Amino acid sequence: MLHPGVFVSKGKSSSLCTLNMVPGISVYGEKRIELGATQGGDEKKEYRLWNPYRSKLAAAIYAGVKSIHMGPGSKVLYLGGATGTTVSHVSDLVGPEGMVYAVEFSHRVGRDLVEMSKRRPNIVPIIEDARYPMKYRMLVPMVDCIFMDVAQPDQARILALNAQAFLRNGGHYVISIKANCIDSTLEASVVIASELNKLAKDKLKPQEEQTLEPFERDHAVVIGIYRRVKKAAA
């Protein structure tokens, strides 16, 4: 197990997989495999293969990040849920004791996310603009981790606003940065360095940075910790 809830299937080639919270059902056509002890009466368990070409989080794990901070029982705010490909795997990771609050701006794309959540009770779909976290403040409690995959020029600011609203002190964030969405005139490394500085100024201290080649070009995943500003004593 590479990370809590992340497993490796070893066949002709090794593949990441997660324990399927809804056995018998694929979310995006992914392959499912059954594994389990043949002796001792243990039931077989079903796992879903996790494609790094379809998921930035899977790509980051393949690339060697040390921790994704989304283990069993975690509460995760997911910004940029899209149709739910990676959301479904995070749902597997946190398990029945955890929760995933998945924010997606597009009503059209969000339909698939809403439909999937009907089978996965640990997903709360939220069709809103992540720039305005106060619009969904009644739906999201304090969380342990924020995952962000929103390709926007102001994504560092969007993350900071959501961290201030929902991320516990000492909680972590995982952000996917697509350099050419921020500034296509600069080298990717320059853009990413600038984003790291923005995050740090908002108390989002970067701890890990990992490029996503060969799965994604000019992408990096940054993982860090949030330290809230202590209020002065009255």
Image (tube, grey):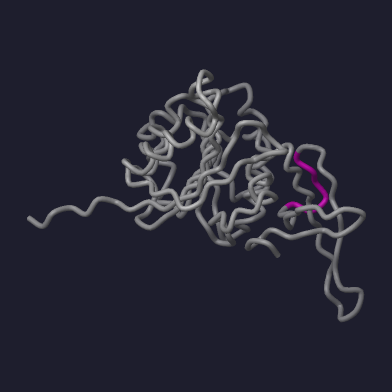
Q: Is residue 157 magenta?
A: no
x 71%, y 54%: residue? 21
Count the labels in the image. 0
**Residue 119 % position (x, y):** 69, 45
Q: Main secondary structure of the magenta part?
A: loop
Q: Work out whether residue 119 or residue 141 is closer to the camera in this orientation and state it.
A: 141
- Across and down, in percent, residue 130 comes to 45, 31
**Quarter of the image containing the C terminus?**
bottom left
Report the residue that reaches farthest toward the top: 185
Image quarter hosting the N terminus: bottom right
Camera-nearest residue between 165 and 207: 207
Q: Residue at x 90, y 79 (%)?
A: 39
Residue 26: within the magenta?
Answer: yes
Farthest residue to the left: give it.
234
Q: What are the residue bounds of the magenta stretch?
A: 22-27
Q: Is residue 168 left or right of residue 120?
A: left
Q: Residue furthest bottom?
A: 40
Residue 90 on image: x %, y %: 62, 49
**Closer-to-camera residue (24/4):** 4
Q: Height in image: 11 above or below 54? A: below
Percent position of residue 38, x then y? 92, 74
Asked which quadrant contains residue 41, the reply is bottom right
Q: Residue at x 55, y 61 (%)?
A: 73
Q: Compared to 216, does 16 lie above or below?
A: below
